[in-house]
Image (cartoon, grey):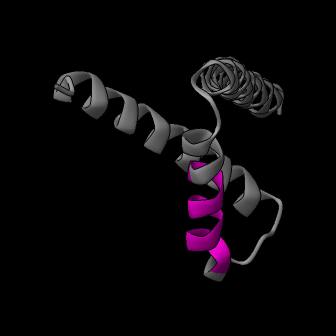
Amino acid sequence: MIDMTYLTNEVLMLAAVVTAYVGILKAYGVPSKHNHLFCLAIAAIFVLVPDKIQQTLLTVSLVGLTASGAYHYAKGQTDKEEREDDADSK
């Protein structure tokens, strides 16, 4: 019997990863009318590959996307502080 809790958690994690990758494509200017196609293609890559490869892809994706988000957040905070310092010095 299939453990539905595990399946649900895996589907939710994959959905978040697919969403993040489509967000990256949007940032590079890919027209939004293609989002559904890219979602299906990226999801198919994760679902159709063997389990060992899928786990490796998920690990790489989660580490890379998390690091990218953390960098973007930290960069935004640094830029905000620099703008505030510039405003204070005027």
Decide whether residue 41 is among the magenta residues.
yes
Residue 66 in the image: state x and y as whole percent: 63, 22
Q: Observer-nearest residue: 57 or 79?
A: 57
- In the image: residue 36, left or right of residue 22: left
Q: Residue at x 67, y 28 (%)?
A: 65
- In the image: residue 84, left or right of residue 5: right
**Quadrant location, the C terminus:** top right
The single residue placed furthest to the bottom in the displayed view is 33
**To which quarter of the image does residue 40 belong?**
bottom right
- Figure check: 87 above or below 75: below
Q: Residue at x 83, y 26 (%)?
A: 89
**To which quarter of the image does residue 79 belong?**
top right
Magenta region: 34-43
- Figure check: 24 above or below 28: above
Residue 59 in the image: state x and y as whole percent: 64, 17
**To which quarter of the image does residue 35 belong?**
bottom right
Decide whether residue 29 is among the magenta residues.
no
- In the image: residue 39, left or right of residue 14: right
Dominant secondary structure of the residues highlighted in magenta in the image: helix
Residue 83 in the image: state x and y as whole percent: 77, 33
Q: Residue at x 72, y 30 (%)?
A: 72
Q: Residue at x 62, y 71 (%)?
A: 37
**Quadrant location, the N terminus:** top left
- In the image: residue 59, left or right of residue 31: left
Residue 53 in the image: state x and y as whole percent: 69, 24
